[in-house]
Amino acid sequence: MLLMTGIDKRFGGVHALDHVNFAVRPGKVMCLAGENGCGKSTLVKIISGVYTRDEGEILFEGQPIHRITPADATRLGIQVIYQDLSIFPNLTVMENLAINSEITANRRIVNRKRWEQTAREALSKIGYEIDLYAKMGDLSVADKQLVAICRALLFNAKLIIMDEPTTALTKKEVDALFKTVRQLRDSGIAIMFISHKMEEIFEISDDVCIMRNGKNVYSGPTSELTKKDFTYYMTGRELVDNYFVPTNISKEPVLKVEHLTWKEKYHDVSFDLRKGEILGITGLLGSGRTELALSLFGLGKVDSGTILMNGKPVKITSPIAAQKLRIGYVPEDRLTEGLCLQQPIADNIMLASLKQLTRTLGTIRHDEVFEKSNEWVKTFSIATDDAHKHASTLSGGNQQKIVLAKWLNNDLDVLILNGPTVGVDIGAKQDIHALVHDLANNGLAVIIISDDLAEVVVNCSRVVVMKDGAIVGEMTGDEITEENILEVIR
Amino acid sequence: MDKAKLKRMTRRTEFYMFLVLILLAVIVQIKSGGRLITFPGIFTRLNTTVLRTMVVDGMFAMCCLVVMISGGFDLSFPAVAALSYSLATTICLNNGWCQTSPLAGLLLAAAIGWVLGMLNGWIIANFKLNTMIVTLGTQTFFTGVSMGLLALKEITSTLPEGMKAFGKAFLLESADPATGIRFTLSAMVIFLVLLCAIVSFILNKTMFGRALYAIGGNEVSAERAGYNVKRTKFLLYSSVGAVAGFIGMIRTCMESQSIPKAMVGREMTIIPAVILGGASIYGGEGTVFGTVVAVAIISLVSNSMLILGIDTYWQQFFNGLVILVGITVSALQARRKH
């Protein structure tokens, strides 16, 4: 259906796409995989007409395409569903569905009846039902996505490009999405699915094209690819699951939680944590795992129960109190909760330890901030040439390292990591995991909160499973397998 | 009416604002001893004054509303209006126009406003700048042009006769039965009703209106959906300029005087009113009905104070309260959604 050969694109000195070849077959799902910044988005923008290519040939349904604008792409039957879904949260579902075709038809006057008809037609394409007059912003991400898919189908789409569609979805929602994708595939539509999540790619795709640094390093049927090969192609290095082996567990627990309850969120939670341990807390969304962490860091409520630090009962009423007790917390959404993106890397690293870096009058010793940050940049091999640059210039994995550095700069006893590698690609993920292992073996007590079971299995020496606000299982050592965890979660 | 519809209605700000308006009206009616509405005559000195005050504020609020729906802020409309009517009146006076009909003055003011609006639109659309900053700049600039560059003077008793007469035109005349004081219902109310109808039609029934909502909701998506965002914004700001100029001239006629400085700071009472009426400070939300209700509330309260024996100093207090309540409610609603 779509055949691209020798596509080349440069932005100034950057060779964004280096003679990329790839093909999408009708009625098949093709995955475009690669880590952040490998050129995936550039390629998509060339197909959809946002960018023009410097070199190379594009054949769509056998016809060569020379210049293409976004409107041409739509006319040919190419539809892109962007990561942000391009929806209008303030308008109704009906308007969201109909507005594109109304604009394309160059209408001037609004005819509600026609809009409603268009909207119903769109929904009927995948047999999806929803209140047409509901406000788009009130829908769940999964529903928004289905609306976006329906809208794309209105244009007799032959090729649908989905840009990282699963990012904000729960496992259940991903399953539902995949069902729809298969349904579309079976009706003869070609799907191009962009992702960096290995499990998903193996589950949904027929063909896969892996890109690295602007080149496609593999393209072919997914069935001929092993997971090991896949990781190699993605990262350019052999990655082995690096299981955590605790070497330095203390006798006495540093943190002990007894019968902790936050009435609306979780109840009667008890566990302990030793130095040198990595404790995993896992469970589905809404199981209370995040709320538990918030309580331990003074951001959530504690209705009853006790927290003991080094054997002494403590009250953690604010993040400042938590820091005084040497507890650190890296939030789930590092971008909004953990980082000031428009501030220099150095300032971000030192943010939680400015007290040590001020003179008598409270002014900051900037040279020292910079010096210390540079040490962290080196230790964590953060990919930057200048710690004065804004944190926003870094990739997700490197941003996560900054947040880690920020907390480690204060001497900590307990570090709580909530979803430490959400949105981070495989290579950087491995780096962060290795880093955390080192920290634990150097005597830090770590809690990893995650719903990424593979992550929990690889990194934790002990796992606590939560469900509906209560602990439903605890495992250590060899008992920790994805199957065992799943059994208790369900 | 089905349940879902009712539920959607009760979730809107303007529904509650409407209830507040009714409640206020009832209070004023009782406290003033039935001076808000009489039967069967309906119109009284008080309610015609309320309507009269609403004409200019209400029309300005319409300008504000459309801009806010598109996710922008226009701080310059009072300055645009002031420069337009001052210059237009001066030109009319110097040429001896508008002796019988105000038409030339109205068209001239609208044309001047349109040019000024185009400047706003051009800067905002082309350079993709923050609308609040741009209009804050043009506001000061326009005032500077009016005061310094053109040195426009106050025109009071010498105002062209045609304008004076037009401003005094009324739809009905009556006398207060208790005091015998004459009152009229200004014909300018027609312009308010017309503008509200036109804006309502544009917002709900034209693709241009839906484009404003779409841009206010998500500008990137609007562009991807195929809207010409640049052209839409230019059209929006230039039209708002023309309408502001027109409103300015209506005001000049109603007040029988053209004072270049009269509009300074007006945006700071109009914008909160629009927000109170349910428009979101983040764009994408807002209705004509809600805006009219909010303007009516403010006009009713400020005009009823004397009658109810409340010191007029409280008007400031009340206006401040409106700003705080309006903006807080809008921000909280937006936060709940995110």
Image (tube, coloured by chain):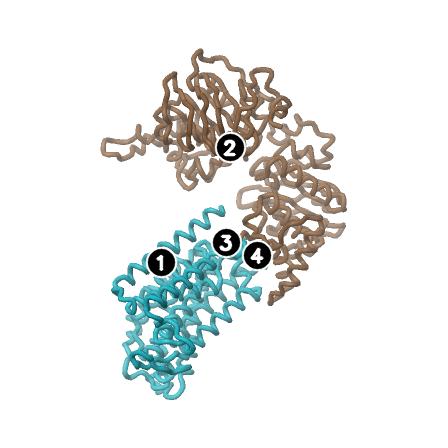
Chain colours: A brown, B cyan
**Helix, strand, or loop for circle 4?**
helix
Say above or below: A177 vs A69: above
Q: Amino acid at mark 1?
A: Val
Q: Which mark is residue B5?
A: 4
Chain under callout 2? A
Residue type of the residue flagged with mark 4 = Lys
Can residue A484 be seen here?
yes
The image shows residue B150 at horizontal and vertical percentages of 31, 74
The amino acid marked with disc number 2 is Gly
Residue labelled with disc 3: B11
Kindly state the secondary structure of the residue where label 1 is placed.
helix
Q: Chain of mark 1?
A: B
Q: Residues within 10 Å of mark 1 (few under 14, many from 20)?
A: many
Depicted A79 relative to depicted A386: above or below: below
Instruction: Look at label 3 and name its amino acid.
Output: Arg
* Label 1 sits on residue: B322
